[in-house]
Amino acid sequence: MDIPAPTEKPAGHWLREAMRCVLRARPANIIGRTGWPAQPMRAKPDPSHHYPLGLHSNNIPEVCIALEGRAILDIEDRRYALRSPCIGVLEPGVRHSEGFARRVSGYRVLWLMISRPSVLVSVIHYRPRKGWDCIEQYVAQTPQGAALFDRLRNMSSPTTPAQFEPFRAEVLATLGVLLHQAVQRAATSHGTVTAINQHEAALSHLREQLDHQFDRLPNVTQLAEMIRVTPDYLDRLFRSWTGKSVHQYHHHRQMHEAMRLCKSGGLLVKEIAHQVGFNDPLYFSRAFHKFHGCSPNDARGTR
């Protein structure tokens, strides 16, 4: 069964739908680790059913809320039925993918990618013969994201009310804050949607990763695939938005973080180099000198 293409919805519509699903959920609807109440299906993961990213993992916790239709959620080598009011809880580093249960059956799901204190919200829609669309995506800054982040990291099993109800409360609180922000944005927004505005959620998410990951570049290709653009196009948008390419911005953040570590004291130059992603301390020292006009040792002596 197909699910009709979404008409224009009022601000926060999908967040409201997600809140209704969470309110109906029970411990048996929570999908995640082996041993949790939700039992995997006998069928094993099938890549031909997967969202285009396929089985992949992220370094932050995620929550997947089934909104409409029949989907599946593959976690490592296990397959789960994903239909409302099911909620998937994915730990960092766990390979997973959503997908269709049957090629002729559509579905919609809402994803929360929690990177304290921000949350990346994505609504994915699958339509038979038409494929997948990301019909809504943005990044929101909210302290509630940090609370949910901590709850997901510390939740052992949602089998008892003592575990499940606090989890439900944190998810609902996060969705409530996101809904409030969405309504406020809609009330104050105006003007023409440019390419940068259209992809601002992905650009904000990319910049946040660059601001906190000094030792390696984020997976630009994966993020570009998520919003259906090429990596080169995403890099050009990022340059227009920030004035720097992804690599230039990353290098600037590396060098500023290196200077901060030098002035804080307590670390050797080779340790600072390693923390900001340089395997060769000599190459790091040259890059540092070229950027700051002084050596790391000189900077370490400047308090």
Image (cartoon, helix red, strand yellow):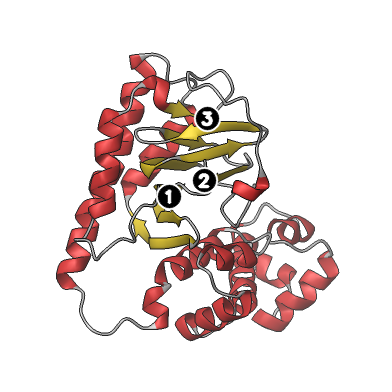
Q: From this viewpoint, is residue 51 visible? A: yes
Query: In the rendered view, does 189 fall on the left or right side of 67?
Result: left
In the structure shown, which secondary structural element does the residue marked by tag 2 occupy?
A: strand
User: Residues under labels 2 and 1: Cα distance?
Assistant: 7 Å
Q: Are marks 2 and 1 in contact (CB under 8 Å)?
A: yes
Could you say which disc has been placed on residue 106 in the image? 1
Q: Are marks 3 and 1 in contact (CB under 8 Å)?
A: no
Query: In the rendered view, does 166 fall on the left or right side of 130?
Result: left
Residue placed under numbered mark 2 in the picture: 100
Foreground residue among 31 and 279: 31
> Label 1 neighbourhood size at 10 Å, few (<14), some (14-19), many (20+)?
many
Residue placed under numbered mark 3 in the picture: 32
Q: x, y (%) of residue 242?
A: 48, 81
The amino acid type found where label 3 is placed reads Gly
Tell me the residue at 23%/55% (across/down).
12
Tell me the residue at 70%/79% (across/down).
294
The amino acid type found where label 2 is placed reads Phe
The amino acid type found where label 1 is placed reads Gly
Q: Residue furthest left?
A: 187
Could you say which disc has been placed on residue 46 in the image? none
Q: Earlier in the sequence, mark 3 or mark 1?
A: 3
Vertical order, 298 against 60 (above or below)? below
In the structure shown, which secondary structural element does the residue marked by tag 3 occupy?
A: loop
> Label 2 neighbourhood size at 10 Å, few (<14), some (14-19), many (20+)?
many
Q: Indicate which label's residue lies in the foreground, 2 or 3.
A: 2
